[in-house]
Image (cartoon, rainbow, N blue to C red):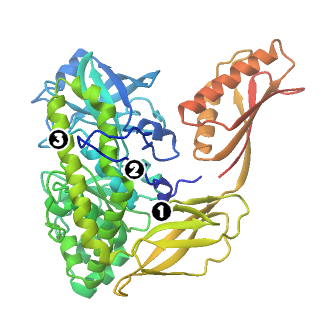
Amino acid sequence: MLTKRLANRLTALIIIVLAGSLLNSGVAQATPSYLEGTDAGAVVFNPLQVNKISLQMSDSDYNSMRWPNVSWDNEGEWRETQMRFTMGSKTYGPYRVGVHLKGAWGSWRDITGKAAFKIKMDAFVDGQTFFGISKMTLNNMVQDGSYIHEVLTYRLFRAVGVPASRTGFADVTLNGINYGLHLNVETVNPEMLRRWNVTSSQMVKGAVPYFPDFWVGHESNFAIESGIKDSYTMLSTLIDANQLDGAAWWERINELADMKEMTLEWATEIYTEHWDGYVRNRNNYYVNFDDEGKATMLPWGTDQTWNGSFGFFESAGLMLNKCFASTECNEMYLQSLARVANKAKALELPQMAANVSAAIRNSISQDAFGPGLDAAEGSQSWTVWQLNSQQEILSSMTAQWDTSLRHVSINGVKRDADLVVTLEPGTRSVRLGVFPSQTFATTAIQPIGTFKAGLNAAHVRVTSADGAHTNTEKIWFYVLTKRSNVAKLSFATGKATLTASGKDIANALAAKYQGVNGLTLTLSIAKNQPKAKALLDQRSAALLSALKLNGIFPTKVIKTLTATGSTATLTVSGSYRN
């Protein structure tokens, strides 16, 4: 299954010339898609579509969500709630879920204001998910008058290679009360990281009220979010390394952390003017330790971005200051800045701002808790000005450090350098061409060798035009494998109703088929029963509906009647490539 970290890169968006208002295009052209990922949950995170979430709980639970019963640092127990989710013309549910309020010092509101919510799908029903999602985070955006900061910021983080949340929008009601437009932010947890092919032994969070940094004795100021409980051993090891200096620090920190990922995270925080993250405020960040104990840093709380630039070489964070003092790390950071500038330009963020703003305009105008449409559009225009300003500043400043690749060509076809190239089963080699971002930079492709099934990497050495900066870029290839499986789903005799075990097998098939290519399903039942053809059609429809709910759409479906077999099962034969 293709769920590798780089599989979620985006191709460059359609470029549209802006005229007049910063948020209105002077040329009518197709709107690009901002959907990312091949997992079932991808459709939920579409920033160009406002979904609807309806929540209903008991009056006593509703009234319990008033201050001082709850507060920003006392979210309380999960309250049992019925949830319906409407996407387009389709309504899903009701689901029995758990709900409580969310937020911190600046954004927390109780139910008398514009509350933000967390939804736990399996709080009362074991194993329950929604499109594979176990927990939903609904931000109230009360500190972002534009409604678009997080959408833009998280997209840039993802594009440069930092695992970060996807986003969508939803109009939220609770007990029939309209709580307005919310941002549905993908929850940062091991479930999200698996989509990036990142393991997680433990995840900790730095946030209010302690604003923790990597100082000895400060371990307990970090909240353990998932994984190993009641142990800060890996964090302590990382903290100890940050008491070193110079070459000793650089050597040790490379053993304990993915410094390429971390410098990209820091560079993107600064580029997006994220003053409330690790770099400027030691707040709103996660540190994930993978199965080998290696650390990465992940962003959070990006609503207060794009409000005014600050220095690219100033930080309140201990680790980044250690990096500035290290020749090798500082060089990596400079090249990360160049990568961020390149990606921001390729993503056409100002046009994305215009497209998203148009998509949510009606919901903004109906948000009784919001600043109003005029104020929101003013904030959106200011955001676009900041986007353009940052691009102009950083692109010029980082040109000399740029050792990235703009494009590659695979067998003569030009592709984005960051996209995983999917190859047919049995492919052993390709013709690879590379195109550096910097004019007159030189490249050297290292011998690739023979491809194997699965993930393969080609290494390209890029040297800047002045010869002062070098970097090794990876081009990823995924060679598909032909696969097949057979399963039998049990139904009530003579009916199209799945049994409990049949539902379990259908869910297992949905998980198996996530992200596969060219899925062909052959569905069959025994013909030695009354109205066998009609029953085959009904049972096939039930299975296909269950798969569709999980984002599985077969390329081809074949339905057959067999001479023998049980009248209480549907045999499912799948063939696919992954």
Give the residue type that dot 3 points to: Ser
Residue 48, how many percent across, how many down?
38, 36
Task: Determine the residue positioned at 57% across, 31% down.
Answer: 548
Q: Secondary structure at mark 1?
A: loop
Residue ranking furthest to the right: 563
* Earlier sequence position, callout 1 versus callout 2: 2
Mark 3 vs mark 1, CA separation in Å:
32 Å
Q: Nearer the viewer, mark 3 or mark 2?
A: 2
The residue where tag 3 is placed is 379
Residue beneath the point at 37% across and 47% down: 16
Query: Is residue 508 found left or right of 35 in the rendered image?
Result: right
Q: Residues within 10 Å of mark 2 (few under 14, many from 20)?
A: some
Q: Position of residue 222 (x, y in %)?
A: 22, 57
The residue wearing badge 1 is: 418
Of badges 1 and 2, the one in the foreground is 2
Is residue 270 visible in the rendered structure shown here?
Answer: yes
Between marks 1 and 2, how big is the CA–CA gap?
Answer: 19 Å
Q: Residue furthest top?
A: 530
Tell me if label 1 and label 2 are in contact, CB under 8 Å.
no
The numbered mark, 3 or 2, whose residue comes first in the sequence reads 2
Q: Hey, which quadrant is residue 82 in on the image?
A: top left
| Residue 548 left/right relative to 207 | right
* Tag nearer the camera, 3 or 1: 3
Amino acid type, mark 1: Asp
Residue at the extreme left of the image, as rendered: 68
378, 296: nearer the viewer: 378
Q: Which residue is mark 2?
A: 15
Q: Indicate the amino acid at tag 2.
A: Ile
On the image, the x and y values in percent for residue 487 come to 72, 37
Contact, mark 3 vs mark 2 (Cβ under 8 Å)? no
